Amino acid sequence: MNEFTPPAGLRSADINQLPLDVFDGAALPPQVETPESGDGGDSDQGIGLREPPVCGEWSFDTSDDANTRTAAKMVEAAPVAAPRAATPDRIATPAVSRASGIAGGPGVPVREPVRDYVQRVTPRTVAPPLRTPAAPRSMTPPTPLPALAELKSMHDASPGDARTAISLATALDKRGNIEGALSVLARAIEAGADGVPLRCARATILSGRLRYDDAEAELKRAAKLQPEDPDVLLQQGILACRRAKWRDAVEPLSMVARLNPTSALAHFYLGESLNKLDRLQEALVAYERAAELEPTNWRALKGVGIILDRMGRPADAALFYRRARDAQSG
């Protein structure tokens, strides 16, 4: 066998680790072919140097190398499982017989390389069927409840009844029919109903939709009728809080707290405005009163905790924070 001498300056002659373009211009030694013995034995002669692997490849492809016998011997020595019924996905034959074109001559059974054998006998994985996307939910609005139809009938029969008009407007507001709710209240006002509660109801709906200017206009009309009405004052204080006018909110809310001491909303929003103005002791009293009147008002309980935190009482604050969390989750 001819011995190959690597070019000068090359440190290693490991043909599996050669960089690209090392042998450009160098003559490769001739490849000597030695007939294979009939018993399939190995031979070290006649194996020429292979070209270096392309960058990115793991190894040479030995599927067509008839002189490589190590892998075939491993397959031949391995125990063969009992043959299974042939199916389109699995073929149980561990070896094939090639009639010609092999170094061993015609009719000599030759074991196929391990890679081809494994690929041939391994069942193909069938991809699961794609999930059909669920049909979109129907966006049809829910059927109006009988109570809403009954309220409409009552309002049509007596459009000047303020209580029925407010109840119907509240039901329409909860269903997102804002203009319908406002028109019901306006119709009741035109029919001669008491304008103060109706104007306050319109202001509440408008304020909830961030239409603060329209809500303020409604409250001014109501204040002309009864300037010290608790409902008017309460709505004025709430609207001032929503517009972050904390100083303007204190006076009307304080008046409501005196005129109607059981108004939890008045005490809560009063605590909000006083907290923003750093009047901590007064805010604590207002929040605590709101929590006493409405124990499930987690915002009032949280307000107490915030004030206690600001006053340097973290242990007491933690107690109210836990109560607020329980009230909110409950």
Image: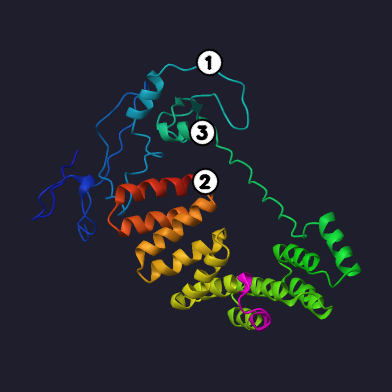
Q: Amino acid at mark 1?
A: Ala
Q: State the image quarter where residue 170 is shown.
A: bottom right
Which structural element holds mark 1?
A: loop
Q: Amino acid at mark 3?
A: Arg
3D distance between C-alphas at marks 2 and 1: 64 Å
Query: Where is residue 267 drawn, in percent x and y?
Result: 50, 62
Between 211 and 318, which is closer to the camera in this rendering? 318
Query: Where is residue 240 drawn, in percent x and y?
Result: 52, 76
Query: Where is residue 116 drawn, in percent x and y?
Result: 46, 35
Between 101 and 155, which is closer to the camera in this rendering? 155
Asked if residue 134 is positioned above or below residue 248 in the image, the reply reads above
Q: Amino acid at mark 2?
A: Ser
Residue at image location 63% in from the left, 70% down from the top: 231
**Marks 1 and 3, the one that precedes in the sequence:** 1
Q: Nearer the viewer, mark 2 or mark 1?
A: 2
Q: Which residue is mark 3?
A: 120
Q: Which residue is mark 2?
A: 329
Asked if residue 201 is positioned above or below residue 149 in the image, the reply reads below
Q: Which residue is mark 1?
A: 82
Q: Is residue 81 rendered to the left or right of residue 201? A: left
Q: Tell me the magenta residue range.
A: 221-232
Question: Is 230 part of what is drawn in magenta?
Answer: yes
Query: Where is residue 187 drawn, in percent x and y?
Result: 81, 77
